[in-house]
Amino acid sequence: MTTRKSRFWTYAFLSLFLTFSMAHAQAEQNDKGILSASSLQKIVDDASAKGLDVIIVSSSGSSANSAAMKAKSEGAQAVVGHFRDRVAVLGHFLPEIIPNLLLTFKKVNDNIGGSGLLWTLFIVILSMSIAAVVEHKYLNWVIHKLSSVWASLPSERSINMCFLLVRYAGRTVGIGIFCLVAFILSSVILGDSKYEQATIFQWIIAVAWAWLITEIWRIWTSPKMPSRRIPALNDDDAAMLFWWLRASTIIGICVIESTNWLEKLDFHDNLIVLFRILATAIILILTLTLLAKARKPISSLIMKPEDKVSSSLLQRLVAYNWQYAVGLYAFVAAIFSMYRLVMDLPNAMGLIGAMYWVLMISLTAFGIGTVMIDRILERRRTLSDLVQEPQIETVLTKSGEHEEIDQPDDQPVKAVIVRDLSYVGLARQALMLAIFGGAGIFMLSSWGVDFTSADSVLGRLWGVFFVIVSGYVCYQIAKIAFGRKMIEEGGEISSEPGEEGGHGGTSRLATLLPLLRYCILATIVVLTTMIALSELGLNIGPLFAGAGVIGMAIGFGAQTLIRDIFSGAFFLMDDAFRKGEYVDVGGVKGTVEKISIRSLQLRHHMGPLNTVPFGEIKTLSNFSRDWVMMKLKLRLTYDTDVEKVRKLIKNLGKELQQHPEFGDQFLQPLKSQGVYAMEDSAMIIRVKYMTRPGDQFVIRKHVYSRIRELFEEQGVHFANRLVTVRLAEDENSKALTDTQKKQVLGAALPEVETAAGS
């Protein structure tokens, strides 16, 4: 098993080298003037576009395709041969490492003079130590000032992030003081030879970089400030992560800067290459060790153990496998870095370092962006005063106990709606997308990928990504803006199920906003799609032409649909109805609940939801505009004094206008209209009053109740329905006894009850 594994990794290692070797062979052959297949095809296409006939053959008379394939094969062989030669040269140089080191050190010492390189290193270390003492004094003063200012502030994310960034800024100033003091002391004591200056500059900058990066890790782990810690880490995990991150940073920067220092001391190029290969191996080992140590804490941040069941599949995959992906990248990056070092290619040491740079820059950008969002956008939210988070209020009762006050059940739903309509969430999403896109560009650029060429595949993909992200942000901005405006215009009109309609609706703008919102969002989606297709190199002109033809076909084949759309547009232009108003469209009536481009939905007060196309509406009656007159019929007996009833109704109208609950709802008081009709058993008197739409039904209950009480007090009687049944006056009816007459009348009773019920 061990032998098989060794063979597998050996073959994998060689495959990676050969693959990359062929890629570089292509580049080298292009530099030498040998045309690749793609370059050759481009020339042929250009000539064909100009109307020229092109025939290409190789020197041996073979086809152009064979020549290109031969060029590729020769290029790959040349790169493999060059790689073998470089490995052989480095292998032969291994025994000469120690003699070359001693010879170069002797040359450097002779150039410096005095006590030589060791004395220079000692002075640099001493200068940095003195500078560190000065920086420590400054840092204690800064921390004391910050602690006195920030100690009383609450532990909130934005405040904690702001505190940590201010502290980092203070430490950055301290590191600047450290560099300044160390440079001055070293330059005063030492000479101005290039080796001395290289030693001073290289090691002071190395310490400064290690210090700055360590402070970034300190911000995000906060091992000694758990109350200000941003990630949800416990104290042990935070301390462990900070220790390993700091150790990896210090060791990694030391080995990298050591090779740079040796290069500036004019050591042999082969020696520099070998030392940098060793440094790459050390950094790879440090990275893999760090991943093993950070696996559990980072996985718990991505997905908490208690959320294992409720988490998504993607979240579980990332939580369980992120370390393998990062470790694989680090391994591949180390292999290619070593290859580039051997082949003397540019950017050889930046592949693994790019991963750390992306992490640091992303964390810093996220921190600064979070502070700006929380401190600027949070203060400008205009909906925070309209709907707030649900809170449980208590009052102190006479017995001294606290009693909870019931809160509306819809408060949590409204709070969620406000959060969805906030620009804060969108700003955070845009920040994450910007960080993700910038990180991807930085990582791919470190591998030599060119994004500036519009003809390259990656350049086009980057353009598509930018267009989609921009379209998404514009879509969300429009959605939030329309949603906030709709809430400002009154939102939804709510009514209790079963109530009769007639209440006033929303404003005209609130009625039109959903349709405008739909049109704007659809336009953004279509434009984003078209621009993205254009970025991919597709010609979108025929798409517009095809859309015109399809539109004409739809216009001829869907005339009813077109009629509905245009009818609805004219209804809205005439302001015939609004959302929340009670309308009757001829056989169907109800409250306008939803308006689309071709129909409206009416909710009947008994529950049914009716959808009515605009083209089917011939007449429309709106019961929710301006005012409404309610007329009530009263059945009174014929001996009732009509003038007395008029005065009673007039006084009752004045009384109801003074009612504390609904008196202000009257637009005109209750009045008597006199005798309206005369029936067989009753005299019909009608009364009327005017209110706003929807209020008449609430007032009607009180009016009926007070009229009954008032008439009972004043002796005014309501008439009952009377039915007179007569027997024909003939010989047969005269011969009937009283009992038989009662039986005849009883037989007619069901018919009378049926007529009364109808």
Image (tube, helix red, strand yellow):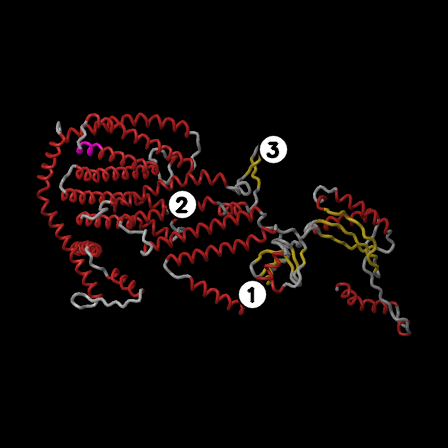
Q: Are marks 2 and 3 in contact (CB under 8 Å)?
A: no
* Rendering coords of residue 488 (x, y %): 57, 46
Where 537 falls versus 115 (above or below)? below
| Nearest to viewer (mark 2 / mark 3) | 2
How busy is the neighbourhood of tag 1: few (under 14 within 10 Å), some, or many (20 plus)?
some
Residue 540 vs residue 602, the one in the foreground: 540
In the rendered structure, which disc, 1 or 3, sits on the residue that comes first in sequence?
A: 3
Query: Which residue bears the numbered disc 2?
Result: 431
**Mark 3 = which residue?**
398
Label 1 sits on a secondary structure element that is helix
Mark yes or no: residue 20 visible.
no
Magenta range? 194-200
Residue ID for mark 1? 561
Mark closer to the observer (1, 3): 1
Residue that appears at 18% across and 43% down = 276
Where residue 203 appears, as percent x and y from the top left, is 22, 34
The kind of residue on which mark 1 rests is: Leu
Disc 2/disc 3 C-alpha distance (Å): 53 Å
Q: In front here: 640 or 468? A: 468
Q: Position of residue 358 (x, y in %)?
A: 31, 44
State the separation of the CA atoms marked 1 and 2: 43 Å
Q: Which mark is residue 269?
A: none
Amino acid carrying label 2: it is Leu
Per the model, the C-alpha gap separating discs 1 and 3 is 67 Å
